[in-house]
Image (cartoon, rainbow, N blue to C red):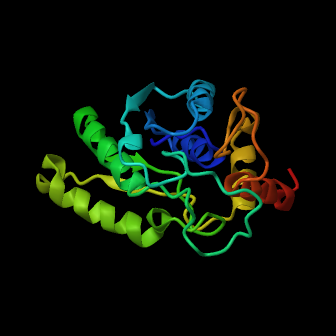
Amino acid sequence: MLLSGGLDSATTLAIAKREGFDCYALSFRYGQRHAAELDAARRVAQHLGAAKHVILDIDLRQFGGSALTSDIPVPKDRALDDTIPVTYVPARNTIFLSFALAWAEVLGAQDIFIGVNALDYSGYPDCRPEYIAAFERMAGLATKAGVEGSPITIHAPLVHMTKAEIIRKGTELGVDFDMTLSCYDPSPAGEPCGRCDACQLRAKGFAEASV
């Protein structure tokens, strides 16, 4: 279970738990601008009863190329559209899913959950259903489990849901969204900026969900 500490991954973890999975949560210290989302991931993993929570170190600041992994300013008050914003981290979900795939093989797990969605999102190419399907096909070719007839399934239960639908589902499943953090540029105390794309999408979702 890829767990960022945001509302999408928290809801996905709750869905996996409801479906009866023992959930091994994986988060990354990847050189992002702040550690507040990892604090949120710890809270969520504990609150929702993950069997284990690993935080892995990878330094994507060595590459940069994103407002989240370099000194490029995070856009604020941007009109949300279909263009890929500078907060896109090159190949991030491919990197994260590859680590999840390796751990799944070690655990003997045949299921990986990721909280991507392709409706109310920031236009990232690695959040689309066709990307998830392609990664799953690759996983079947790239792993011992896959070639021996036990392929790993990539679950993206939120992929066709709006933010409002995700919030309603999480609320129904007992997710405490106060524990989550979606902001790209929080204060040193972990307070959300309220103005980045992630904050705007989150606020819109809560308003539309009447939560």
What residue is drawn where x is 63% and y is 64%?
161
Q: Quadrant of residue 209?
A: bottom right
Which x, y percent locates residue 46?
58, 24
Q: Looking at the image, which is closer to me, 39 or 60?
A: 60
Residue 22 visible? The answer is no
Tell me which residue sits at (17%, 55%) in the image.
Answer: 142
Give left or right: position of 186 versus 13.
right
Most foreground residue, 71 or 139: 71
Camera-side residue of 129 and 15 = 129
x and y, in percent, of residue 41 in the image? 57, 32
Residue ranking furthest to the bottom: 82
Q: Is residue 191 left or right of residue 15?
A: right
Image mark count: 0
Rendered position, 140 above or below 50: below
Residue 32 in picture, x, y percent from top left: 51, 39
Q: Quadrant of the N terminus?
A: top left
Q: From the viewer's perspective, is 36 left or right of 26?
A: right
Residue at left 38%, top 57%? 91
Query: Which residue is more in the foreground, 73 or 80?
Result: 73
In the image, farthest residue toward the front: 71
Identify the residue at image location x=58%, y=74%: 83
Residue 39 seen from this side: yes
Where 100 sits versus 92, above or below?
Answer: above
Residue 34 vertical placement versus 121 (above, below): above
